[in-house]
Amino acid sequence: MPTERYLDYNATAPLRPEARAAMVSALDCDGNASSVHRAGRAARALIEEAREAVAELVGAHPAEVIFTSGATEANATLLQGSPEGPRLASAGEHDSVLAVPAVEPVALRPDGRIDREALEARLSEAPLVSLMAANNETGVVQPIAEVGAMLRAAGGRMHCDAVQGAGRLDKETWAGADYISFSAHKLGGPKGVGALVVRDEAPLKPLIRGGGQERRLRAGTENVAAIAGFGAAATAVLREGTHEQARLAALRDRFEAGLRDLQPAVVIHGAQAPRLANTCCFSLPGQRAETLLISLDLAGLCLSSGSACSSGKVQQSHVLLAMGVAPEVAAGALRLSLGWASVAEDVEACLHALAQVIEKQKRRVA
Ligand code: PMP
């Protein structure tokens, strides 16, 4: 069996040891965080400690953080609730945003960034705009601060899906957003927990009603172990700081240089725009994504085609199509995404496996 090499961090990151340890320890905490007795207070303390770390990721106040079951719920809570009225969102948003009936898509430019003129022309239609910090497929970083300023001037509010950007982009990125969504598992925390930051008393209607948890904005007894794991992952990300992004950028750049050597006609999607340091979405001419994924999987390499949430079903990437990528090129797109446990050998092993696939194909054609 080949060594498993995990290169799919934008789908989910492996659990960090710190997060695992925090979760195991929190499982011994028997109280309900709403109870006043000591067991309840111990559970509450773990939640509040995690809230501080999560808030710090985006320079928010801990009181602005509402824990949810993940970013899908955070996005749904906001976009299905307040403020009332239609919402605009970039056409490259995650399905958890685009699937909300009130959401109207705004075009992307060929480089993957939102078409700001198109957005500006429609601002009067909607009191809320949802724009992701960075795209899960291409890693393209959106102009959050600029769009936030544009919206403030127009009296609108801004939501930022920070799932792929949190911990990877500068803290200044988040200054213009009124609402920010997170998911723990992309940071090396557990799956099934996330948060919505609601800034400066911006309006919010709960999606899930019941008990008074999370300032009456998200009912349900808190999953203390998952929240503790989320907090530990956020703390680890904060500790790593910008060095980690520089390390990942060097690995990603080496991968892209290797790809160009292998196949000069490779298309790297979003390469004309600012991108996350960890992501490379590429199409090799004449290659289909499913065939490549199977060959890579046999070599122990875990990568993704299109959006991981929809893999399994073979469907075109709505993000690449919105960027105007030709359907036959989009059908070949693969995504490599790196993270906290990635090492140079992972990238070299991936290049080696791709070289073998290309070589085999050349022999078949000859
Ligand atoms: N937004 C983006 C940009 C994502 O990448 C994902 C996860 N693929 C989500 C939202 C949904 O997050 P969760 O898995 O926590 O529901």
Image (cartoon, helix red, strand yellow):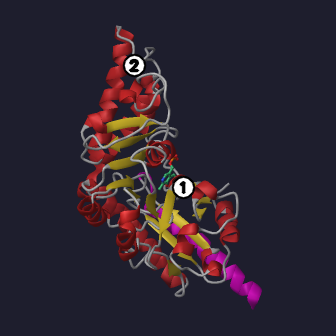
Query: Residue 339: image x %, image y %?
Result: 43, 55
Q: Which residues are magenta?
A: 340-366
In-front residue for pair 101/222? 101
Indicate whether 246 appears above or below 203.
below
| Residue 277 in view, yes or no | no
**In the shown orientation, is residue 226 left or right of residue 248?**
right
User: Which of the two labelled residues, at mark 2 and mark 1, occupies the earlier sequence position?
Assistant: 1
For the point 53% across and 73% down, which residue is it?
Answer: 322
Distance from Cα at disc 2 to Cα at disc 1: 36 Å
**In the shown orientation, is residue 340 left or right of residue 102?**
left
Q: Quadrant of residue 287?
A: bottom right
Q: Main secondary structure of the magenta part?
A: helix
Query: Residue 26: image x %, image y %?
Result: 43, 23
Q: Quadrant of residue 215?
A: top left
Query: Residue 55: image x %, image y %?
Result: 29, 41
Indicate whether 173 appears above or below 329.
above
Q: Which amino acid lies under the numbered mark 2 shown in the image of this protein?
A: Ala
In-front residue for pair 26/49? 49
Q: Which residue is mark 2?
A: 33
Q: Quadrant of the C terminus?
A: bottom right
Q: Which amino acid lies under the numbered mark 1 shown in the image of this protein?
A: Tyr
Q: Which residue is situated farthest in the bottom direction here?
A: 366
Q: Is residue 348 magenta?
A: yes
Respond yes or no on whether mark 2 lies under 8 Å from ligand 1: no
Q: Is residue 191 magenta?
A: no
Q: Quadrant of residue 330?
A: bottom right
Q: Quadrant of the N terminus?
A: bottom right
Report how many numbered discs are placed on residues in the image: 2
Query: Residue 355: image x %, image y %?
Result: 60, 77
**Numbered label attached to residue 6:** 1
